[in-house]
Image (tube, grey):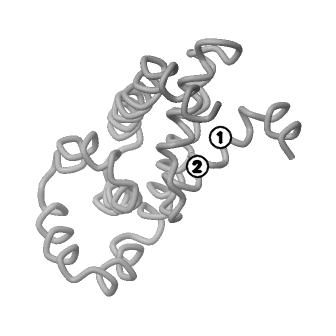
Amino acid sequence: MTTFLIDHTAWVLFLWVLGNQAGAPIPATPAILAAGALAHSNFEFMTVMAVVVGASLCADVAWYSVGRWRGAQVLSPLRLRFDWVSARIDRAANLPLAHEVVRVGVRFLPELNPVAAGLAGATRATLGRYLPCAAGSALIWAGTWIGLGYVLRGAIAGHWA
């Protein structure tokens, strides 16, 4: 199993982050921190950034597309699950720049990431307007956790040694 993870680190990280950013209850932060720590030795920093940002954008575009296709109906299950979300969805849907303003903060709350992406699609934001914002927030999010792992690599490596 360990050999598989070492040989396919980029794919495992991609799938892990994709699941997290798509809304699955998978904690991606520890994996991204570890990848940042490994970036110092044999797994390059820019490769890790590309993998994490790419996975994030895949999840975002998928939820955006579902929101665009199904409209506000895509958010109905979330309305039923979280009462407090319903009022905020209605309020945010009426703000033209809502998804740009909250996008960076929402990225750090993976449970709400699909809501923001679906909301962008449901409010008919154009992909050309949405994608740069999503990419920017993914870069900030990935850079924060990868950079922290990179800086703390000695403490992380000492913990697992």
- What label sits on residue 14 in the rendered view? 1
Q: 2 or 51: which is nearer to us?
A: 2
- What label sits on residue 91 in the rendered view? none
**For residue 83, side relative to residue 17 (left or right):** left
Q: Residue at x 50, y 48 (%)?
A: 61
Q: 6 or 77: which is nearer to us?
A: 6
Count every numbered label the image shows and give the total. Answer: 2
Q: Position of residue 99 (x, y in %)?
A: 24, 48
Residue tagged 2? 18
Q: Secondary structure at mark 2?
A: helix
Q: Position of residue 62 (x, y in %)?
A: 54, 54
Q: Residue at x 35, y 28 (%)?
A: 140
Q: Secondary structure at mark 1?
A: helix
Identify the amino acid type marked 1: Phe
User: Looking at the image, do the residues carrying marks 2 and 1 touch, with CB atoms under 8 Å apart?
Assistant: yes
Q: Residue at x 50, y 65 (%)?
A: 25
Local packing at callout 2 (Cα closer than 10 Å; few below 14, some 14-19, many 20+) is: many
Q: Residue at x 83, y 41 (%)?
A: 2
Q: Position of residue 13 (x, y in %)?
A: 65, 40
Q: Position of residue 4 (x, y in %)?
A: 87, 40
Local packing at callout 1 (Cα closer than 10 Å; few below 14, some 14-19, many 20+) is: many
Compared with 147, 98 (above or below) is: below
Identify the amino acid type marked 2: Leu
